[in-house]
Image (spheres, rainbow, N blue to C red):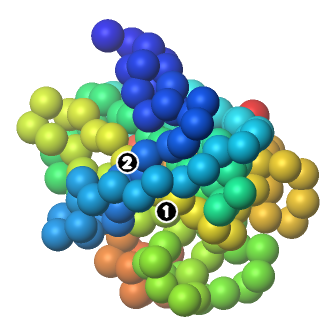
Amino acid sequence: MRISTLLSAGLIGLVSSCIFVAGNTSDPEQAGTLKTVRADGFKRASADLDAKSASDVEGHATFTEVKAGTIVELVIEQAPPGWHAVHVHEVGDCSATDGSSAGGHFNPTGAAHGSPHAPEHHAGDLGNVWVDASGRGHHVILMPDLTVTAGPNSVAGRALIVHAGPDDLTSQPTGAAGGRIACGEIH
């Protein structure tokens, strides 16, 4: 089944009255907890991810702005099993074979890198996605400091990066997440 079909049949299809957002999916102890966020009108952006750094990773992400922030939903396939960091990067350019053309993490406030649930973190710090033995991963997170609507915290015109390793959520400035194995321009 194509990734875009999975997303359209999944979480975002439920937004007519409310959206169910998985809890902190970068923390295995909290994965699967549900929260409800009212959706009274929203804007969307998306990104198709392409393989970088000689990987086979592909995927799709949606960004849905709701009153509480922006819900980011990512589905990836053909990724190495394990945890992988996910970040919004500052430049919407995935032309480099290693994804370096996307620049650094999106950080409009100049904050230190950290967990997306910490008081201080880059706006683009989205935590980690778990990839199962079949190479598939699904990550959903509500980011209060991101928007789709134009402004200083907008994801539009930026890039979504999946990294080779996990984000340790503390190392500066990038979480020691390793190379970039997938990149998608956010439109």
Q: Position of residue 68 (x, y in %)?
A: 65, 62
Q: Quadrant of residue 17?
A: top right
- Residue at 72 percent across and 43 percent down: it is 40
Q: Quadrant of residue 119?
A: bottom right
- The mark tally for this picture is 2
Determine whether, in the image, residue 185 is placed left or right of residue 6.
Answer: right
At label 1, counting other C-alpha atoms closer than 10 Å, the crowd grade (few under 14, some 14-19, many 20 or more) is: many
In what quadrant of the picture does the N terminus appear?
A: top left
**Residue 85 visible in the snapshot:** no
Give the residue type that dot 1 points to.
Leu
The image shows residue 145, relative to residue 71, as above or below, that is: below
Q: Quadrant of residue 93?
A: top right
- Residue at 15 percent across and 41 percent down: it is 132
Look at the numbered disc 1 and give the secondary structure of its residue: strand
The residue most toward the front is: 17
The image shows residue 79, relative to residue 155, as above or below, that is: above
Give the residue type that dot 2 points to.
His
Q: Name the residue under label 1.
A: 126
Determine whether, in the image, residue 168 is placed left or right of residue 19.
Answer: left
Q: Name the residue under label 2.
A: 139
> Could you say which is closer to the camera, residue 2 or residue 178?
2
The image shows residue 173, relative to residue 66, as above or below, that is: below
Look at the numbered disc 2 and give the secondary structure of its residue: strand
- Residue at 24 percent across and 34 percent down: it is 136
> Could you say which is closer to the camera, residue 114 or residue 104?
114
In what quadrant of the picture does the C terminus appear?
A: top right
Q: Where is residue 124 in the image (x, y as percent from the top left)?
A: 61, 65
The residue most toward the right is: 151
- Dot 1 or dot 2, earlier in sequence: 1
The residue most toward the top is: 1
Q: Do the residues labelled 1 and 2 touch (CB within 8 Å)?
A: yes
Q: Where is residue 115 in the image (x, y as percent from the top left)?
A: 44, 78
